[in-house]
Amino acid sequence: MAVSNWQLAKKVLIITYYWPPGGGSGVQRWLYFSKYLTDFAFEPYIITVDEKNASYKFIDESLNEQVQGIKVFKTTTIEPLRFYSRLLSGNEHDAIPQGFAGEKSSGVFQRISRFIRGNFFIPDARRGWNYFAFRTAKQIIESENISFVITTGPPHSTHLIGLKLKKKYNLKWLADFRDPWTEVYYNKLLFRTWLAKFADAQLEKKVLRNADVVLTIGPSMKKLLAEKVAEEKSKFHFIYNGFDEDIFKKLIPAKSRDCFTICHVGILGESQPITSFLEAVKKLFQSNPEASAMIKFKIVGKVSSSIIREINQMVPQLKLEVTEYVPHADAIQQMLNADLLLNSLAETENSELLISGKLMEYVASRTPILCLGNLKGDAADLLRHLEFAIVKARGNVEEIYSYVDLIFSRWRRNLPSENAIGSINNYSRLETARQLAELIHDVSG
């Protein structure tokens, strides 16, 4: 139900650090929520950081096409990550952390910088944006008479803006968690003291207690967050990330009969080991020597140098192709072109929480999927109804080998391997925006 008269629309202020033309997974969720909220009687106002000053790892100008017509207010910021990147690489963007993929940890400077980031910038090193975003938020709230605010993290320092706005205006506030806060896996790499951990946990509890709604990306993370404020569990909700049907309608798979392509799209860091997958490929090559000439492994996204070394050492005959970053539509095209998609979830204490940001797009591509991770996690639950998708625990090399061999054998015989998944409309961005619109209406009263 598209709204043609904006005066009928409910205004909502969305504060997000990541926004086009910033690239990467952090942009996607609220880019598409904002795009499709306009179909449900909402007028989004966006506050974000000016990309000229932001600590963005990648820029993707093509994403600007998705948010045309949305009111966007960009602010300056003061934060150390661009300076850190320049010291480390000579460039303001190349060494900006992205899940620590590709970042060395053994050097003295790296260890010192991680300690500083973990103990002097709480909850994160992008907190310097808050002053400017809060100032702009006040102006928009007062001039546009806005009574509903959304903040999304990471960076979780963004939620502290919502906390201040809630206190000043007593408006309705939704805090969205795309990743855990205190449990996020890379916190363990920051050499945090007990005092830093305590301070961070206190900030998280303040946000959870004061937000009118806490939203996240899956049932396990909803449970994790709700247990921290046990007396208010009813305000915790989850809405999955989705896929944008518009993009898929414009793309056509271009699969090759000359080469069987295994593809991993997204960050591939040290906490996402693929050793068991490589052992399975090695076994496939040993059992079928012809396979080594037919199989190519493509990595599209930032990848740890240690993983590249491991691939070359364990399976030197595996043809490897690495592309650090491509525009979003091109990444989806790579999924469509692949014969097998690999998804490697991070090894972390709360691994059941993890749902890769690309997982819904993997599903929508209808390409066979091999996911490495927790068999009882949210990702496994999502993939159970797929005929050609499977989740395997790391270490189960035999079953991983059997699945890779199955898909490869079907490819050699030119047999179809489309996913029998029924309707995937529940995972479309339009549907997830409808769920968000209903939630906002319920909270607004």
Image (spheres, rainbow, N blue to C red):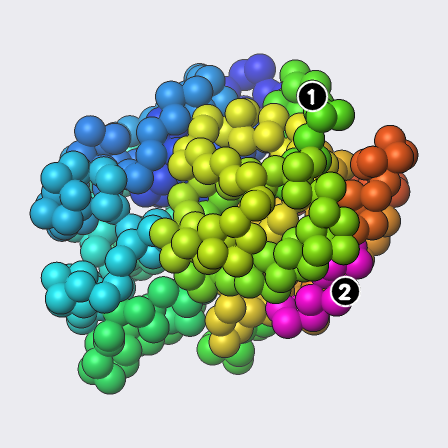
The residue that label 2 is drawn on is 399
| Mark 1 or mark 2: whose residue is earlier in sequence | 1
At a point 23% along the width and 51% down the height, the residue shown is 126
**Which quadrant, please, contains the N terminus?**
top right
Furthest-bottom residue in this view: 194
Main SS, magenta residues: helix
Residue 241 versus residue 35 in the image, above or below:
below
Between marks 1 and 2, how big is the CA–CA gap?
A: 29 Å
Secondary element type, mark 2? helix
Residue 7 colored in magenta in the image? no
User: Horizontal placement of 292 versus 313: left or right?
Assistant: right
Q: Amino acid at mark 1?
A: Ala
List x then y, in percent, for residue 138.
Answer: 24, 41
Q: Nearer the viewer, residue 303 or 40?
A: 303
**Percent of width and height locating residue 136:** 22, 37
Above or below residue 243? Residue 128 is below
Task: Please report the bounds of the magenta region as a residue range.
Answer: 393-403
Residue 42 pos. (x, y %): 53, 31
Q: Which residue is mark 1?
A: 254
